Amino acid sequence: MNNSIFIDIGHQLRKVDLEQVIHLYYVDGATTIEMSHDTKVVCCTTLKELFQHLPHYFLRINRNVIINVKYITAYYKLSQSVSMSNGRNFIVTRRNVTQLVSQMKSQFTLVK
């Protein structure tokens, strides 16, 4: 799978390096893609459509958020939330917790 995608943003096609994407979230009819180096891209493409083109290390953790598992800094079991490398925190729905933990195990070594 390619590590970049082009996203239609108004009158331009913007290349997005997927390795740099920390998370994507949907608010008020727009999807915001937050990347490392404090870069943001805002587009009208739905999360569902974007998710179909993302590699396996991306996970939809709730209705409005897709995260790059590689940028997780902490998972809080009690509150079922994740912290990302850019300081943002997101709630993980119960139906997605198992998939998140499984994905974390495949990407990282978990020590008890």
Image (cartoon, grey):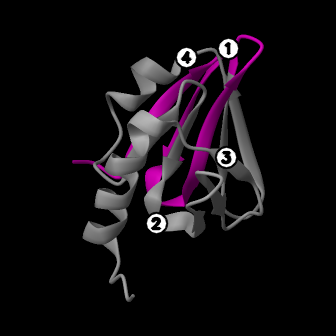
Q: Which residues are magenta?
A: 1-30
Q: Residue at x 73, y 63 (%)?
A: 86
Q: Which residue is mark 1?
A: 10
Q: Residue at x 55, y 65 (%)?
A: 72
Between disc 2 and disc 3, whose residue precedes? 2
Three-letter residue code for mark 2: Lys
Callout 2 touching callout 4 (CB < 8 Å): no
- Residue 106 appears left or right of 51: left
Q: Residue at x 63, y 14 (%)?
A: 44
Please name which of the two marks, 4 or 1, marks the residue nearer to the observer: 4
* Main SS, magenta residues: strand
Please name which of the two marks, 3 or 4, marks the residue nearer to the observer: 3
Tell me if residue 23 comes above or below residue 112 in the rendering: above
Task: Measure the alpha-carbon separation of dots 2 and 4.
Answer: 23 Å
Between disc 3 and disc 4, whose residue precedes? 4
Q: Which residue is mark 4?
A: 45
- Under circle 4, the secondary element is loop
Q: Which residue is mark 2?
A: 70
Task: Measure the alpha-carbon separation of dots 3 and 4.
Answer: 21 Å
- Under circle 1, the secondary element is loop
Q: Position of residue 88 (x, y in %)?
A: 75, 55
- Residue 86 appears left or right of 97: right
